Amino acid sequence: MRLQILAAVAAPFLLLAGAAVAAEPADYAGTWNLVAADYDTPRDAAIDEVTAEMSALIRGITRKRLRKAATYSSHYVMTPGDGTMTISSDRSEGWTTPLDGTEVAMISDRGEDIHLSRRMKNGSLHSKARSERGAQSVSFELSADGARLTVTTTIVNDNLPRPVVYATEYARAR
């Protein structure tokens, strides 16, 4: 009985403590540099695994197109604003979007019309770009000490048997 009362009293405090460690947009502020030089191998392995189920007639061209679409940046610069986030990289000069999931029309680095949205969820920053050809979701997750950033990219397309998922890791610039 005492244990049940203790658990009932402690539960709200434990929930508050858990919420305190969730990352906020300001925690992402700064420059992030790619940790390792070889991210082609795991990315290509993810592409090869998904396309292995496809017909040999289209597998090669699909792999080529996915390698072109499945890029990663050498660095990110993240600048949070009042309810917004600007992310620039070696692939973009910086796109600012609200962090409430509202879509913003933009032109991608490949000249394609896209709709970009971002939001915070459970301490992670989530970005989604969709176009006529498919969608790409990116999840930015900070390490517990805030020194590392894991970027997980998911590419979805109706012509693929399942999504392509790969991750890259970045270190906070000092």
Image (cartoon, helix red, strand yellow):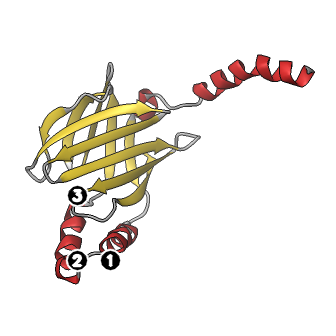
- Label 1, residues with CA under 10 Å away: few <14, some 14-19, many ≥20: some
Residue 85, percent across and down? 31, 30
Circle on res. 158: 3
Residue 93 screen position, x and y as percent: 18, 41
Tell me which corner region of the image, top left, top right, bottom left or bottom right, holds residue 128: top left
Please tell me which residue lies in front, 138 or 82: 138
Q: Which residue is mark 2?
A: 59
Q: Are marks 2 and 1 in contact (CB under 8 Å)?
A: yes
The residue pinned by badge 1 equals 52
Confirm whether residue 73 shows in the render. Answer: no
Q: Residues within 10 Å of mark 2 (few under 14, many from 20)?
A: some
Q: Residues within 10 Å of mark 3 (few under 14, many from 20)?
A: few
Q: Pinpoint residue 82: horizontal percent, then vertical percent.
A: 32, 18
Residue at 88 percent across and 25 percent down: it is 3
Q: Residue at x 20, y 45 (%)?
A: 130
Residue depth check, mark 1 versus mark 3: number of the one nearer the observer: 3
Q: Secondary structure at mark 2?
A: helix
CA–CA distance between discs 2 and 1?
A: 7 Å
x and y, in percent, of residue 151 in the image = 40, 50
